[in-house]
Image (cartoon, grey):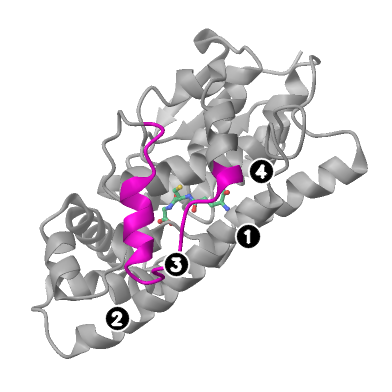
Amino acid sequence: MASKFTLYSFAGSQWAQVAHLALAEKGFSEDEYDIKDIDLMTGANFDPEYIKVNPNGTVPSLSSASLEKPIIESTDILRYIDGLRGNSSLVPSDPAVKSKAQAIIDLVHSYDARTDTILLHARDDEEMKGKKASGFRDFLVNRQDRLEKEKAANPSHPFYGPKVLENGSLSKFYTTEIGEEHKQFYKDSEDAYKAFAKVMDKLDSLLVLPYAAGDAVSEADFHVVAWLAHAMSGAGSDTTQIQNFDVLEKLIQKTTPSFAIGKSTREWWANISATPAFKKVFPTLH
Ligand SMILES: N[C@@H](CCC(=O)N[C@@H](CS)C(=O)NCC(=O)O)C(=O)O
């Protein structure tokens, strides 16, 4: 029997929700695993002890005495959880269905699909002012503080230098007065929104129905659920209005007026949101 495992998780982490959906779907009870909360809002993922668990400093991770080293990708974590229980698998056995599921997973994990576009980017002064007054500012500023502190304490650690620069290139728009420098950020954000709209269109064309890759719920469903729920809540939707895409749709239409959430996406969402695993993990959007 595999040992009890530890899931490093955070409620505000979209990819951690993939693991929670898998745990719910496969019927794990809460005493069968431990949860370690890694607070992304305070940059706890940058603690050197956590970097030892996950050298990317990201959530989720999964460790277990029966594993040689922690698993640090949501795709692999879902498959590990799936493999622990012999009931029907979330990984399709039919090669054609499996590759369809993989194409969907790859799409929502692609650079153009990053939900940072919705949560952290701004296309004009008004949006920028809104972001600066929101919790996203605290998120970026807390991260930067923590990164700089850890970099000073661990000057030769390869993780912190590049990460300070990466986060700093975004947080500076939140901490400086709105001016000339923001213009390029707005242009880049427009491009990011255009790319995000294309991802949503592509997803609509890939979804099979009733579930993402066909007749049965598969790993693909859980990756899309986690991603889309996070985009919807990050867009500012009423988190109790699970079926309401209006806020996200309007936000994207500001850049791409012809954009609409597709018919297949809406139908698939209605199907998947009726499942017990979805209801357990997403009583509200997050
Ligand atoms: N490819 C990874 C991505 C994980 C990831 O980016 N997680 C986000 C939260 S959803 C994170 O930890 N971000 C913190 C950071 O990048 O500093 C996976 O699928 O597990």
- The residues tagged by marks 4 and 3 sit, at their Cα atoms, a distance apart of 33 Å
Q: Quadrant of residue 97?
A: top right
Count neighbours of disc 3 (C-alpha within 10 A) and say few if under 14, some if 14 to 19, many if 20 or more. few
Please tell me whether residue 255 belongs to the stretch shown in magenta: yes
Q: Is residue 61 visible?
A: no
Q: Check disc 3 and report its element: helix, strand or loop.
A: loop
Q: Which residues are magenta?
A: 242-265
Mark 2 against mark 4, which lies toward the viewer? 2
Question: What x and y, as percent, mark residue 284?
Answer: 35, 27
Q: Residue 130 in magenta?
A: no
Q: Residue at x 41, y 70 (%)?
A: 256
Q: Earlier in the sequence, mark 1 or mark 2?
A: 2
Mark 4 highlights which residue? 75
Asked if disc 2 is less than 8 Å from ligand 1, the answer is no
Dot 1 corresponds to which residue?
202
**Mark 4: is the Cβ under 8 angstroms from ligand 1?**
yes
Q: Secondary structure at mark 2?
A: helix
Distance from disc 2 to disc 3, alpha carbons, whole Å, reads 23 Å
For mark 1, give the secondary structure.
Answer: helix
Of the pair 32 and 276, the residue shown nearer to us:
276
Question: What's the distance in space between the residues labelled 1 and 4, CA to CA?
Answer: 20 Å
Q: Amino acid at mark 2?
A: Phe
Along the line of sight, the residue nearer the viewer: 117 or 172: 117
Q: On the rendered structure, is 260 left or right of 201?
A: left
